[in-house]
Amino acid sequence: VEVGARCHGGDGLWVKVANECFGQNQVEATIFSYLDEERFNAIPAEPTLRQAYGAIKWLINYQEGMFERMDEECMSRITSQTSSYRGHQVFLAPGKHVIKTQTCFSWAGCII
């Protein structure tokens, strides 16, 4: 139950996605609940209209070994030819040993 329910999960990468899809997010709602009662009370009890669809795609590492580099041609296609692209993070550094992705702590990165 806890996974996906924490407003600080995923380093907040999902906040932009939530804002674009629903016009609100859990982080701001939590802040408003403590600091701005009027803005908090203005938030609907549930999203009233989906404005878009969104996703975060986690990059899975299928091999163990030394990370050399990202495939720049592939990243260029993703960043320039995908209209839904909003950003990315790579969690690997060149020259570092990497393990196969087994949990959320061993993802290779994400595309937003």
Image (cartoon, grey):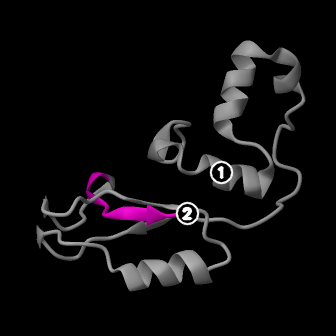
**Foreground residue, 77 or 48?**
77
How far across and down, in percent of the image, does residue 17 sit?
65, 56
Give the amino acid type for the residue marked by disc 1 in the picture: Lys
The stretch in magenta equals 105-111
Check disc 2 and give the amino acid type. Answer: Ile
* Residue that badge 2 annotates: 112
The x, y position of residue 24, in whole percent, is: 76, 43
Q: Secondary structure at mark 2?
A: loop
Residue depicted at 65% across the width and 51% down the height? 16
Quadrant where the image shows the C terminus: bottom right
Specify the label residue 91 is tagged with.
none
Q: Position of residue 108 (x, y in %)?
A: 31, 64
Front position in the image: 20 or 72 = 72
Q: Residue 21 is drawn in which quadrant?
A: bottom right
Q: Position of residue 60 (x, y in %)?
A: 32, 70
- The residues tagged by marks 1 and 2 sit, at their Cα atoms, a distance apart of 9 Å
The image shows a total of numbered marks equal to: 2
- Residue that numbered label 1 is attached to: 16
Front residue of this view, candidates 92 and 36: 92
